[in-house]
Image (cartoon, grey):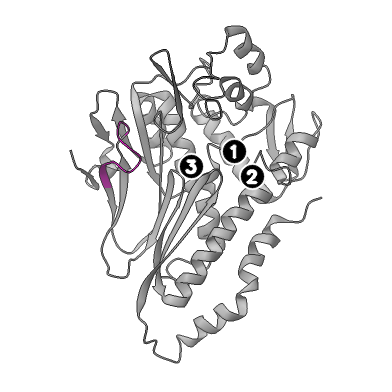
Amino acid sequence: MKKDIHSRIIGIIAMAAACILLIVLSTLWRKKKTGQTEAKATGFSMGSVVTVTYYGEKKDAEEASAETLEMVRILDEELISWRSTGSELSRWNNEAASGEEVPVDEMLGEAVKKGLLLYEKSGGALDLTLRPVLDIWGIEEKTAEEFSVPSAEELAEAKKKCGMDAIKVSEKGISRSADVKLDLGAIGKGYALDVVYNQMNIGSAGIVSGGVVAVGGSVMVFGSKSDGSDFRIGIRDPEGLPDDILGYVTFPSGIRKMCISTSGGYEKYIEKDGVRYHHIIDPKTLYPADSGLRSVTVVCEDGLISDGLSTACFILGEEKAVKLLAEYSAEGIFIREDGSVFSTPGIEGQVVLQK
């Protein structure tokens, strides 16, 4: 069996443990002259840009931000990536025989277990075995010239290789009763936020006082900024350029942890013969979701849940999505096809629109 991923992740911190220990202990007996600062780091993992901003003493914040980037990279490449041949998930996808319960790292098991529950609660809207259908569409890889709409026969054949009902998770491992494979793309970025928060020495008693970690469209805020001001996370304008912001959702200084994930048809798409085909496929129709929404932003404490819910809610549409959010005590911001915005009551007062 592959080396325990926990050891690799904890090893990131262990390599700098002596240095960090001295930093933490030094706060008990000497006054620091540098004061709090903002440290930023940027990388690329999970097919997305990863940005880290930590607030705290300069050395602490800089070291923690660099370690966070490395942690996300290892989590992706060695645990949850279906593309990386050396990951736990790829090993399971390629080696697990039908009916065989294969031991996996408990972190992978935890992620898949939460994904299964999301599948059930969403009525199948979030399907982590849909990769064969996504590949038939090829919206993530093909150019407009290469792209063609799949036939009903092609989609039906691909659908035979899908089905979350075939996946079972237990304390002993993960098994499948049919030839299906897992793709955690719809929950992986949010799960990375949870891993960072739980494994890094951050938070109220940690080596940094607060921060913002973004993995693609999933963002985590926690603690306090150096100046004590609110956190403001932008809500992208689905019809604008990547940097165009429709508004902000604000979070007060001192917040323990909150995660924000957004899914929308603007993220990856191909236009062909005047029609836009986006990458979020409805498992029921096997076509790009058409629910009357341009994007959905979900806010809750759990990163994996926020990530998975944003996709499921975009597929389900506003009415069903609001009911699903309530089951998870999550909040949502919906941008409709007509450009209007609806926010659930629990987050409405924190949403500031610019137009």
Q: Magenta residues?
A: 238-248
Quadrant location of the C terminus?
top left
Query: Which residue is pictured at 43% across the width and 43% down the height?
Result: 217
Kindly state the secondary structure of the residue where label 3 is placed.
helix
**Could you tell me the amino acid type at mark 2?**
Ile
Q: Is residue 24 left or right of residue 171?
A: left
The answer to whether the residues at label 3 and label 2 have Cβ atoms under 8 Å apart is no
Q: Can you give x and y, in whole percent of width and height, for residue 115 in the image?
A: 57, 37
Residue extending farthest to the bottom is 29
> Based on the displayed image, in which of its 4 quarters is residue 346 positioned?
top left
**Helix, strand or loop for the magenta stretch, by majority:** loop
Q: Is residue 322 left or right of residue 154?
A: left
Between the residue at mark 3 and the residue at mark 2, the CA separation in whole angstroms equals: 16 Å
Q: Which mark is residue 184?
A: 1
- Examine the rendered structure and indicate whether residue 36 appears above or below residue 113: below
Q: Is residue 90 left or right of residue 336?
A: right
Kindly state the secondary structure of the residue where label 1 is placed.
loop
Between the residue at mark 3 and the residue at mark 1, the CA separation in whole angstroms equals: 12 Å
Mark 2 lies on residue? 80
Q: Is residue 204 left or right of residue 164?
A: left
Query: Which residue is pictured at 67% across the width and 58% down the height?
Result: 6
- Examine the rendered structure and indicate whether residue 244 appears above or below residue 15: above
- Examine the rendered structure and indicate whether residue 341 appears above or below residue 12: above
Q: Nearer the viewer, residue 33 or 130?
A: 33
**Could you tell me the amino acid type at mark 3?**
Ile
The answer to whether the residues at label 3 and label 1 have Cβ atoms under 8 Å apart is no
The answer to whether the residues at label 1 and label 2 have Cβ atoms under 8 Å apart is yes
| Mark 3 or 2, nearer chain start | 2
Q: Which mark is residue 163?
A: none
Mark 3 lies on residue? 305
> Based on the displayed image, in which of its 4 quarters is residue 229 positioned?
bottom left
Query: Which residue is pictured at 61% across the width and 80% down the height?
Result: 18
